[in-house]
Amino acid sequence: MIDSHIHADTRPYEDFGKMAIAGIETAITCAHDPLRMTTSDVIFDHWYRLLNNDVKRAAENGLKLYAAIGIHPRSISDDFQRALDELPSWLEEDLVVAIGEIGLETASESEKYVFKRQLQLADELKMKVIVHTPRTNKKEITKITTSLIEENIDPSLAVIDHVDNSIIEDLIELDAMLGLTVQPQKMTAADAIFILDEYGFDKFFLDSDISSSPSDPLSVPKTVHKMKLAGFLEKNIQKVSYKNVFKFLL
Ligand SMILES: [Zn+2]
């Protein structure tokens, strides 16, 4: 299995062992907002940690980590232009498979600018993007997110994450992949399975988005287990827990 969206830097060493024992071979750790990003140097130290300390901690537990590097909408430092300028050199690292997670939280002017610049960079480099959708005003903000994607990048380079029932209808026709985050207080395995049953298996990845918020490092294997019990075909389970993300990001 692949967990397509985690935040390894906020998790204890032991989580990686539990994930590996449960059958997760690979995970993508995404840049986010673990600290107050007072200057771009804090952003760079965060990126450095993902690509070094966390890759090592996971590997020692049998979990292969790749990284998505980028400026999260809640991590925009006052000197964000410097982070945008330096970003391309970080993307050359072997373990970087996408720009992410990026997107909009409140759709402020600076968020829109930083998101747009990163989409344009990804389009230029033909790199994939992992796109965040927020909890608050989800439907309204996701509409703005989607139009920025359509204006600035080939949508087939994007995965839009944390998709739920409130936005699925607005996204299903878009030529992008969609992430289902199974997470306490956000979406249960049953909610995710309901969406898969309704919309098919070709466009979706499962992820846990484990972070310092309420999280379950085993949410992908638990969802897979529930799908098996519910009688879903093995090939469809494979698509959403491994194949689609392997094809798209690795
Ligand atoms: Zn996340």
Image: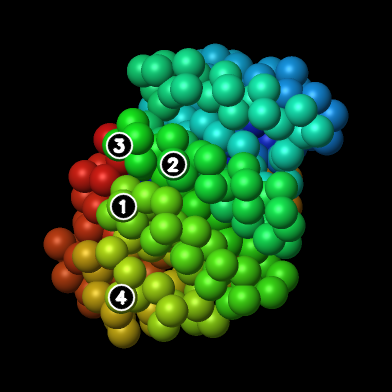
Say what amino acid the circle numbered 1 marks. Asp
Residue at 71 percent of width and 47 percent of height? 110
Q: Is residue 88 above or below residue 235?
A: above
- Give the residue number, with chain letter if any, for mark 1: 154
Residue at 47 percent of width and 22 percent of height? 88
Determine the secondary structure under disc 1.
loop
- Give the residue number, with chain letter if any, for mark 3: 126
Determine the secondary structure under disc 3.
loop
Q: CA distance from mark 1 to mark 2?
A: 10 Å
Marks 3,4: beta carbons within 8 A? no
Q: Which of labels 4 and 1 is toward the front?
A: 1
Residue at 84 percent of width and 29 percent of height? 38
Check the picture and name the quadrant holding the C terminus.
Answer: top left
State how many labels appear: 4
Q: CA distance from mark 3 to mark 2?
A: 10 Å
Earlier along the polypeptide chain: callout 3 or callout 4? 3
- For label 1, count other residues whose C-alpha is less than 10 Å away and answer few (under 14), some (14-19) or many (20+): some
* Residue 208 visible, this angle: no
Q: CA distance from mark 4 to mark 1?
A: 14 Å
* Residue 192 visible, this angle: yes
Q: CA distance from mark 2 to mark 4?
A: 22 Å
Say what amino acid the circle numbered 3 marks. Lys
Q: Which of labels 3 and 2 is toward the front?
A: 2
- Residue 98: image quadrant is top left
- For label 3, count other residues whose C-alpha is less than 10 Å away and answer few (under 14), some (14-19) or many (20+): some
Considering depth in this image, is 81 or 76 the residue closer to the camera?
81
In the rendering, at what x and y percent does residue 188 appear?
A: 54, 72
In the rendering, at what x and y percent does residue 68 appear?
A: 48, 34
In the rendering, at what x and y percent does residue 97 appear?
A: 37, 32
Q: Is residue 221 above or below residue 6?
A: below
Marks 3,2: beta carbons within 8 A? no
Residue at 31 percent of width and 52 percent of height? 154
